[in-house]
Image (cartoon, rainbow, N blue to C red):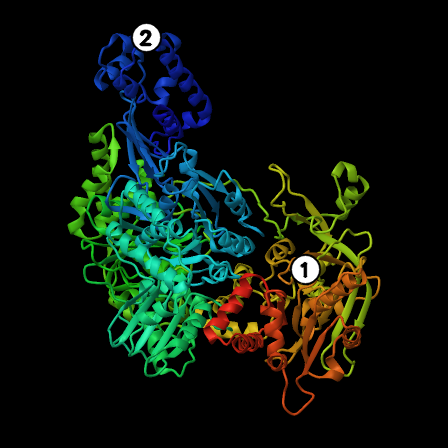
């Protein structure tokens, strides 16, 4: 393998300094490689019968490709015989042999080539297999130096591999993902991986490589763990559920490595998994992506949605905790026979690299086995939490760290307590006098007693800082905390304040959280997180921070430096990166913090001491100086002189340099690499040396030794010479820019002020590149367009004659007439469109019926019908006229390849006119995201329009951008507002998002209406707050305009609104307005059952609307069903028909005895459903809770638990919007 690597490396000639040789090699490199390999095999074949010494094997692998390929057959025979005849062949002797064999002209210059390898190591000692799991996220940067004088090659290899050596205690450098994967892989026989779509370095990536390489785990199994890569889609975790129930897997250890998006799709199966009493550990990287593809660090909404499934919940907030808590999760699962979700921060912690303290795998496995034998059996939540804390206590000896369900730090007499879960815990330090912090380690089960025990009795305010993005309703942690204080025994119940920072994750820092706490302390319970101004964070004196502004081609420089600081200099390090993939070349902001002290705490948002900018184009996009402290060093990789710095950079940039007295250094990497013929690993080496030469002088000597010792080389002298030459050249190339006193005197214009307002940090986006420690980082991809399912991308403008050919010669072109989603869509026709409310009434609620005859459309009770609406024809024509295009211009658009399509399936194209694509496919009148504004900027030819667009998406323009959102400006409005930003027709089609189907609850039973489907819809209309323009919902406007016979594309979406399995079980329905739709279907289904002679159970309907005369929807039908006895109880609440408003929750409160009987009588097992707007959900629940308290004579806590149990049994179902 080594020889093959050398052969390939030498053939590439990445470092080739000899142009003639390069040209010759480049002429036909494959021929040279093949010839060299043939000759190599021939030599080995000749000496196969002999005992080839290891030293001879190594030397044979050192012969360069050019030398080996040029040998004739006779010369190969002589080489083989010489090797056989020589007992010990040294480098000198091999050189002598080659010199005799060839008489080529000596080439004076040295040729250096590189390769990148990925390794998985396994160490075997004695009779036992001691597994060394080394991450595949580690590139081995191999540098091969070939001296053509003697045709010998020098192999130099620097291994950046992260990972945990299984039989080592102590500090080891690893990432959060790898720490979790190591534990999961070591303790599992079967691992399911549900990859994240927001990063190439997803949780589970390394495990796949370990399994393929046959790396064993720590359980003693003969075979390596099986790692299965799954798809994140609806009904995910079916395979896990199957494994749980299979006889073969009952004695196996199972775990899953997943993204939080996968958890959302697992919900139905998680209920069954929780009930199976099977110890499965779900390690989940929590992350969220907004509409602009920005990754939200502080949004745990997706993973928390499974909190009521019955699974346990553990959280970790750092790389060290990720490792520890992974072990604890497996121990708890084994001991309690319950499945558990372990959450880590999937945006920062998962990618962050730190040195952590680890434990031998055998010791971990022994601890898990010990806990499994203890087998905890408990009946209530408090006892279970106590048992889990017992596991924490026993693990403290193993981990050298003690964890608790609720971890309080701070003064005993704290008056303010900040309750945190997730990333906020890592910055919740030094928040103020009499301010304590309570970290939630064990979120489920939630123990009221353990929580209250951790809260100081002096607490007056409790601030719940939770990682969710919903800005409307209270967060789930807030609700748990508030409920806990119902049992508070202190003098006065503390005020509980909710702070949901999911939309502010990019702001999350110690200074920001401190400012938030100060605002909360002075508030009356209401917080405005948008107004929180972060206080400056300060590094500890022992900590230094370097900020690398890197690209995909140079990101390994910071990774090498981090590795050297840790392994060679013994420093504690933290390597964190944020990636903006929206540029043509991704920009990576990497923060490397290091300290000689192992006890320090790192602060991610603090100002840096040094910045290394490897691509100066980022100076126009980021305020880099703002991220540096005064007197810091700024190194710019640019081909500039001191004078050119003045002309190539903005006035705002130079003013900032002067204000902070920044020491600027310049170096031209391109010039150095050209002189030495460097690329790939050679450029990384140059970057390391440049950093170490320009950073702290007391690090240089030791660090240069570190570089040398980090490489394995067959010729240390030659490698030392290379390092010395680069060091000497860097000394010559670095230009120190003197401080210019005129910089402070620069007068800043309005445009310069905007430059000062540029962001100082990278807002993380979906990672289109791998982690900096991943060997695939610098790989390139072919220029191939890939269209995901559901996306619309432009192919090109076509012509009418080609479209005609496709129709005329449909067999030759394989032309098909299909719907846009032929596998899931149906074409139905309107059979009735009837308004239910009076025409004089301001709300248009209407009833629709679609004829499904011959379509094959099938639906179940509770399903929703997706309407694929069209834009208004006249408005589209008006826009096309404005845009200067023709409606009948033909466009060819690629169709998405279905995810379940066989491998190799070719993408198809659809042919439309420009009118059709804008009317039927693209959301021209939808609300534009910031990404759309950003995409328009390059097309704007008017400078003021360009500046205006840039301002609107900047932090300074946030308030105005929000006003535009409230005004409901559309893509068409923005294009009219900025006429100089005029993308071509193909570009525009590529920029506009597709129209998404709108889903409406089906208001009919297919058993009662076999060939039709009914909807109940309210037309959405409103007035824009600024312009007072009339606005209309795109889909309801489309539906109101449909006449009988109109064709409509529809699809089916399943729902949680399902009737009980038995027709005898009572059904209690609460519907508000158009929330009546699914209940009409319920009633029709029961009516059909009754008509078939089936005995049906009671049906109770609570219906609410404004008034009887205008909004008694389906009133005549309901009265008839009630008179027939099918609808046993009809409770109506018309809020505005009397002086005092009456709502359905009040009607329910009057029926407390009835609700208690139907829902809690074990012989009845009734189901409750609520459909409609969100606002009454809490009051409705309170009415049911009160009925349980009265009927069961129990406390509110117990009544709430009963409701939660009903939820788990899917007998308390909400569909609110």
- Above or below, 109 relative to 339: above
In the image, taking residue 430 as reference, residue 1018 lies left or right, namely right
- Residue 542 in view of the camera: yes
Q: Quadrant of the C terminus?
A: bottom right
Q: Position of residue 1089 (x, y in %)?
A: 77, 61
In the image, taking residue 1015 as reference, residue 778 lies left or right, namely left
Which residue carries the number 2 mark?
78
Tell me if mark 2 has few (under 14), some (14-19) or many (20+) residues whose alpha carbon lies within 10 angstroms of its own.
some
| Among the two numbered marks 2 and 1 on one chain, the one whose residue lies closer to the N terminus | 2
Which residue carries the number 1 mark?
1062
Considering depth in this image, is 719 or 484 the residue closer to the camera? 484
Tell me if mark 1 has few (under 14), some (14-19) or many (20+) residues whose alpha carbon lies within 10 angstroms of its own.
few
Callout 1: SS: loop
Taking the view exactly as shown, the residue that stands out farthest to the front is: 1163
Q: Position of residue 979 (x, y in %)?
A: 61, 66
Taking the view exactly as shown, the residue that stands out farthest to the bottom is: 1139
Q: CA distance from mark 2 to mark 1?
A: 89 Å
* In contact (CB < 8 Å): disc 2 and disc 1: no
Which image quadrant for residue 908?
top right
**Number of labelled discs?**
2
Callout 2: SS: helix
- Residue 654 in view of the camera: no
């Amino acid at each position: 393998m080594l020889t093959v690597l050398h052969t390939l490396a030498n053939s590439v000639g990445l470092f080739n300094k000899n142009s003639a040789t390069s040209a010759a090699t480049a002429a036909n490199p494959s021929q040279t490689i093949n010839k060299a390999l043939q000759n190599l095999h021939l030599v080995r074949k000749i000496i196969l019968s002999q005992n080839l010494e290891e030293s001879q094997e190594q030397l044979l692998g050192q012969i360069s490709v050019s030398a080996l390929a040029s040998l004739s057959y006779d010369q190969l025979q002589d080489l083989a015989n010489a090797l056989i005849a020589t007992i010990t062949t040294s480098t000198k002797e091999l050189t002598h042999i080659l010199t005799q064999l060839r008489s080529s002209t000596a080439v004076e210059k040295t040729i250096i080539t590189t390769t990148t390898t990925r390794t998985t190591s396994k160490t075997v000692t004695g009779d036992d297999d001691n597994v060394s799991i080394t991450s595949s996220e580690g590139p081995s940067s191999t540098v091969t130096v070939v001296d053509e004088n003697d045709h010998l090659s020098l192999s130099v290899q620097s291994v950046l591999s992260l990972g945990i050596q299984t039989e080592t205690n102590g500090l080891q450098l690893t990432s959060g993902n790898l720490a979790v994967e190591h534990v999961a892989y070591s303790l599992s026989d079967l691992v399911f991986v549900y990859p994240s779509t927001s990063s190439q370095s997803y949780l589970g990536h390394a495990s796949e490589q370990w399994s393929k390489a046959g790396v064993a785990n720590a359980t003693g199994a003969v075979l390596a763990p099986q790692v299965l890569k799954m798809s994140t889609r609806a009904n995910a975790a079916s395979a896990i559920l199957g494994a749980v129930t299979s006889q073969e897997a009952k004695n196996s250890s199972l775990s899953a490595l997943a993204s939080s998006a996968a958890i959302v799709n697992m919900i139905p199966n998680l209920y069954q998994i929780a009930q199976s009493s099977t110890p499965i550990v779900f390690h989940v990287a929590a992350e969220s992506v907004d509409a602009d593809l920005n990754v939200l660090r502080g949004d745990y909404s997706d993973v928390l949605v499974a909190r009521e499934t019955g699974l346990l919940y553990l959280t970790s907030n750092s790389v060290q905790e990720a490792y520890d808590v992974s072990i604890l999760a497996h121990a708890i699962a084994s001991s309690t026979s319950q499945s558990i979700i372990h959450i880590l921060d999937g945006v920062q912690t998962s990618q962050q690299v730190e040195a952590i303290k680890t434990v031998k795998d055998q010791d971990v496995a022994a601890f898990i086995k010990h806990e499994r034998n203890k087998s905890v059996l408990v009946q209530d939540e408090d006892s279970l939490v106590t048992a889990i804390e017992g596991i924490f206590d026993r693990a403290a000896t193993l981990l050298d760290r003690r964890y608790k369900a609720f971890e309080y730090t701070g003064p005993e007499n704290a008056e303010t307590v900040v309750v945190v879960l997730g990333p906020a815990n890592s910055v919740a330090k030094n928040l103020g006098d009499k301010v304590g912090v309570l970290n939630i380690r064990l979120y489920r089960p939630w123990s009221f007693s353990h929580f209250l025990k951790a809260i100081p009795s002096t607490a007056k305010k409790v601030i719940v800082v939770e990682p969710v993005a919903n800005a409307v309703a209270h967060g789930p942690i807030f609700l748990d905390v508030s409920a806990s204080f119902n049992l508070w025994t202190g003098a006065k119940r503390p005020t509980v304040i909710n702070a949901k920072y999911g939309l502010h994750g990019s702001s999350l820092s110690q200074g920001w959280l401190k400012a938030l706490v100060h605002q909360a302390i002075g508030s009356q319970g209401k917080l405005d997180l948008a107004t929180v101004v972060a206080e400056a964070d300060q590094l500890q004196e022992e900590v230094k921070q370097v900020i690398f502004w890197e690209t995909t081609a140079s990101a390994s420089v910071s990774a090498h430096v981090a590795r050297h600081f840790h392994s060679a200099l013994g420093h504690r390090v933290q390597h964190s990166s944020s990636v903006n993939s929206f540029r043509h070349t991704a920009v990576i902001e990497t923060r490397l913090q290091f300290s000689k002290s192992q006890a320090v705490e790192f602060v991610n948002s603090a100002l840096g001491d040094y910045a290394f900018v490897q691509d100066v184009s980022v100076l126009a996009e980021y305020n880099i100086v703002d991220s540096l402290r005064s007197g810091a060093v700024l190194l710019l990789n640019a081909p500039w002189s001191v004078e050119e710095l003045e002309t190539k950079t903005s006035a705002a940039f130079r003013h900032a340099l002067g204000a902070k007295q920044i020491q600027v250094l310049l170096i031209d990497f391109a010039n150095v690499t050209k002189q030495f013929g460097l690329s790939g690993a050679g450029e990384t080496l140059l970057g390391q040396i440049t950093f170490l030469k320009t950073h702290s002088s007391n690090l240089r000597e030791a660090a240069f030794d570190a570089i040398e010792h980090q490489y394995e080389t067959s010729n240390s002298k030659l490698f030392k010479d290379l390092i010395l030459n680069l060091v000497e050249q860097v000394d010559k190339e670095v230009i120190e820019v003197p401080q210019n006193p005129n910089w402070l005197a620069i007068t800043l214009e309005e445009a310069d002020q905007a430059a000062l307002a540029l962001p100082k940090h990278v807002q993380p986006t979906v990672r289109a590149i791998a982690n900096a420690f991943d060997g695939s980082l610098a790989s390139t991809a072919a220029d191939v367009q890939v269209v995901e399912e559901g996306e619309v991308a432009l192919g090109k403008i076509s012509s009418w004659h080609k479209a005609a050919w496709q129709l005329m010669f449909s067999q030759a072109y394989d032309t098909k007439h299909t719907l846009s989603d032929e596998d899931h869509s149906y074409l139905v026709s309107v059979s009735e469109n009837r308004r239910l409310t009076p025409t004089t009434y301001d709300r248009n609620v209407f009833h629709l019926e679609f004829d499904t005859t011959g379509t094959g459309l099938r639906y179940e009770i509770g399903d929703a019908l997706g309407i694929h609406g069209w834009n208004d024809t006249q408005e589209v024509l008006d826009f096309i006229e404005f845009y200067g295009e023709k409606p009948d211009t033909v466009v060819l658009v690629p169709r998405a390849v279905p995810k379940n399509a066989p491998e190799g399936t070719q993408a198809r194209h659809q042919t439309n006119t420009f009118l059709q694509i804008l009317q039927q496919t693209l959301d021209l009148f939808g609300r534009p995201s910031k990404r759309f504004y950003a995409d328009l900027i390059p097309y704007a030819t008017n400078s003021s329009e360009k500046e205006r667009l840039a301002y609107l998406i900047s932090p300074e323009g946030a308030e105005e951008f929000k006003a535009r959102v409230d005004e409901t400006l559309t893509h068409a409005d923005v294009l009219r507002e900025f006429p100089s930003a005029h993308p071509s027709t193909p570009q525009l089609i590529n920029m506009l998002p597709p129209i998404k189907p709108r889903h409406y609850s089906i208001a009919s039973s297919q058993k009662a209406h076999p060939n039709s489907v009914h909807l109940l819809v309210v037309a959405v209309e409103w007035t824009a707050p600024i312009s007072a323009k009339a606005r209309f919902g795109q889909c309801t406007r489309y539906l109101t305009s449909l006449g009988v016979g109109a064709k409509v594309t529809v699809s089916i979406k399943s729902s949680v609104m399902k009737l009980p399995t038995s027709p005898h079980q009572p059904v209690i329905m609460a519907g508000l307005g158009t929330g009546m739709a699914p209940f009409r279907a319920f009633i029709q289904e029961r009516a059909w059952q009754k008509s078939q002679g089936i005995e049906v159970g009671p049906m109770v309907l609570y219906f609410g609307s404004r008034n009887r005369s205008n909004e008694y929807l389906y009133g005549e039908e309901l009265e008839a069903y009630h008179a027939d006895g099918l609808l046993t109880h009809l409770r109506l609440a018309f809020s505005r028909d009397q002086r005092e408003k009456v709502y359905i929750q009040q009607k329910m409160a009057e029926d407390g005895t009835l609700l208690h009987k139907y829902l809690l009588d074990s012989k009845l097992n009734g189901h409750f459903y609520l459909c409609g707007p969100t606002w009454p959900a809490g009051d409705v629940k309170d009415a049911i809770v009160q009925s349980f308290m009265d009927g069961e004579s129990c406390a509110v806590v117990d009544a709430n638990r009963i409701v939660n149990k009903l939820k788990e049994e899917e007998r308390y179902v909400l569909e609110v919007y």
